[in-house]
Image (cartoon, helix red, strand yellow):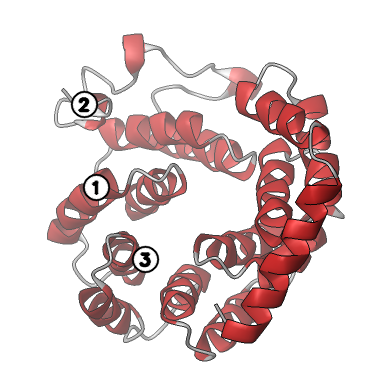
Amino acid sequence: MSRFQWLEFENPSNPPGEGGDEPPATGGGDPTDPQYILRLADEAYRKMDWEKALKLYSRTLGLDNGIEAAWVGQLRCLLDMNENPEALTWAVKAQKTFGKSPDVQAARALALARHGQTAEALAFSDGSMKADRVGWFPWVVRGEILARTGSANAEFCMSKAREIGATDWLISLKVAQGYKNASWYEKAVPAYKKVLSTQSDLAEAWFELGECHEALGFPTEARDAFERASRLVPSRKKYADAYARTLNAGPLDSVLGWVRRLWKGVTGR
């Protein structure tokens, strides 16, 4: 059985969520109001708590499965958790109701791209760009897909996403993650740093920045980023493990990093 079996929400009287847990009715919120649950989901998403956000988006759909924003939120969570087969499955389901939704098409495109189905991914990405109003998400998705192919047009797409949400740090974060997922680490690093300059409590963003530094061969910078993540959430094992690993890095790691950067500059890969 899939670990996401609880995403099945056809019976609203049996709301999704492991153990049937109810969202807290804080701030006078109504736990049976889908718009209230949707707001909680969006808050969790901005904290990079993908699993919690996923459950809340699913809960929203259990109350009202006609809310497009909850479908899209659920798809983004699955993609952020690297659950690409599940994301593709649910994107196909979402398109049965929201066939022309740019964000749903973009989510399907990204899941396909991460499966290596680039031509099909670009076709769905093309479809997502045909709407009268295209939001930031289809532009970030297209940027990641093009970056995966090595196209210089990826940067144009990421710039368009930033223009749409110039004051929203979340969009800069998604741009950073798009570059990282396509292994464009040099582009990802400044994007992460921009986000963390104002959202310094995002442990997961520090961890992802550390992974970028590590991939680029900067063990000291990676260690510092992993330390910040571990300090923010000491109970998260992957943060502590990453920090411990970089503590053992020596001069040889820096030399190897220099060689990798030199090789990348020569080969362009």
Task: Give the foreground label among 2 and 1.
Answer: 1
The answer to which of marks 2 and 1 sits earlier in the sequence is: 2
Would residue 260 be found to the left or right of residue 194 on screen? left
At x 64%, y 39%, the residue is 47
Would residue 125 be found to the left or right of residue 22 on screen? left
Q: Which image quarter is the C terminus in? A: bottom right
Q: Amino acid at mark 3?
A: Asp
Task: Give the foreground label among 1 and 3.
Answer: 1
Mark-to-mark CA distance, 3 and 2: 23 Å
The residue singled out by tag 2 in the image is: 5
At x 18%, y 67%, the residue is 99
Would residue 244 be found to the left or right of residue 42 on screen? right
Residue 190 quadrant: bottom right
The residue singled out by tag 1 in the image is: 85
The answer to which of marks 1 and 3 sits earlier in the sequence is: 1
Q: Secondary structure at mark 1?
A: helix
At x 73%, y 40%, the residue is 202
The residue singled out by tag 3 in the image is: 103
Would residue 98 be found to the left or right of residue 37 on screen? left
Residue 107 quadrant: bottom left
